[in-house]
Every structure is written in C-alpha cells, then in structure tokens.
Amino acid sequence: MRDYEKETKQRVQFIQDLLGETKAEGIVFGSSGGKDSALLGILARMATPNVLGVIMPCESSVNFGLDRDDALLLGQTYDIKHIEVDLTQTKATFLSAANEELNPSVSINIAPRLRMAMLYSLANNRNYLVAGTSNRSETYMGYFTKWGDGACDFNVISDLTVTEIYEFLRHLGAPETFYTKAPSAGLYEGQTDEEDMGISYADIDKFLISGDLVPGMEKILGANRKSAHKRLPILRFKP
C-alpha cells in the first residue's frame, strides 16, 4: 500500500508550488459529489483557502439530488466554497443550435465540455487554476471526454487508480459516501462508469497495479488502444 501520509504532504506541496510559480490566486474544480472530486478538493483545500467547487447539473436528476448533496457535504466538511451552475438549458440550446440530430455517443460528451467551458470561465475571472479530477484507471481506459473532463491546468490525482483513490479517502477520514456509492460521471439518468465500460474498476486496477491477467482483458486492452488519441498531444504539422 502507498504511504498516504507522505503522499498527502507531497501533493499539497505540489499544489502550493504550482500556485506560487503561476501567481494564480486559487483553484476551481468541478464538484460532482464523487470520489475523485472529493479527494482533489480535500488536497486543494489543504494547500490553499482559495478553493471553489462548482456543482454543474446537466439533465440527470441524480445531479440535482444525491450528487449535489454529496458535493455540498464536501464543502461543509472541509470549508470549501461551492456554487451551483445549472447547465441543463444550456445543453438543450446547444443541441437545438446544431440543427441536426446528434447520436447518443455524441450528445453525452456535450455535458463534460460545457462543464469545462464554465470552469475555465470562472477560473479566468478569478485568476484561478482549473484542477483536473481524472484518475489513472479512467485515463488508461479512455473513459473521459476529450477537451471535456480531460482538460485542466493540472491534475494531482492522475497517477492513482480508483482502488487507491478509495484508500486515500479512507486514510484522510473522508465521509463514507465518497467511497461507497457507484462511480458515475452523471452523464444521464442511472449511468454508472462500470456499466458503461462493461468491466469493474477492481479488475482494471488489478491489471494496472500488478500486471496480472484479469477477466475482460480484451476489453481493457481494446479500450486503451481505441482511446490512444485522447492521451496524445495535438498533432501539429512540421514543415
């Protein structure tokens, strides 16, 4: 197991150094009520009092209920300021403006991109940095939206698998809800990460941490190959 006491200090110092180097005055992040944003929020708050969590419901009623409650719990527990920006009508307007019917795989990526546009607008207005909340397991599987939740100024939890995120939260004494409810990106009603991917985080993490073969290896490797473009820098023409 990782030395989470040592890593807490290292990650907090990393954030503090980054703020000093960039002259940024604080941090903004999307507060989804889930495990990743909870861990990021706690570490960010340890580094600076200037942290803003943004709750951004977009259609799914879960975003308006349980997820919002858990995001607010994070704010209350760790003294993190939160605001709410409802993007439901914004998405509806966006879909209408497209003037053509978008297939479901396209439309579900709109919410993460709208959320990131909002985070950067709020960050620019405050001279804050946008903190990312994607973990190692999601990144390997490509389970994130390119130029959506995959876009950020820095990510201090990107090397951690979902299993390690849970361990870290327990080490920090975080409220139980953040490591017991099913992981979900809140993309649509009833959506969960593991159902979307067709494999459990436990199996993904076992492979990533130990290298052992696990059930569903073809799904893990296939998803990694298919999503390779998401992890590459922009391809630029070189004369």
Image (cartoon, helix red, strand yellow):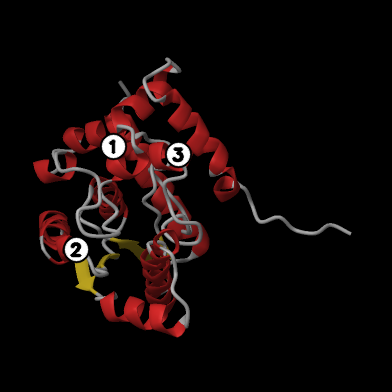
65 sits to left or right of 218: left
Q: Position of residue 198 (x, y in %)?
A: 34, 37
Q: Label 1's element?
A: helix
Q: Are marks 1 and 3 in contact (CB under 8 Å)?
A: no
90 sits to left or right of 228: left
Q: Is 222 or 182 nearer to us in this picture? A: 222
Q: Position of residue 3 (x, y in %)?
A: 31, 25
Rendered view: 10 above or below 37 = above
- Spatial CA distance of label 2 from label 3 is 24 Å
Residue at image location 41% in from the left, 80% down from the top: 94
Q: Is 230 or 59 nearer to us in this picture? A: 59
Residue at image location 28% in from the left, 37% down from the top: 165
- Occupied quadrant, residue 212: top left
- Spatial CA distance of label 1 from label 3 is 16 Å
Residue on which disc 2 sits: 63
Q: Which residue type carries mark 3?
A: Met
Q: Label 2's element?
A: helix
Q: Which residue type carries mark 1?
A: Ile
**Is residue 80 visible in the rendered structure shown here?**
yes
Q: Which residue type carries mark 2?
A: Asn
Q: Is 83 or 115 nearer to us in this picture? A: 115
Find residue 165 and name its label.
Answer: 1
Find residue 141 and name its label.
Answer: 3
Say few, some or many: other residues with alpha carbon within 10 Å of mark 2 (under 14 / 14 to 19 / 20 or more).
many
Q: Position of residue 140 (x, y in %)?
A: 47, 37
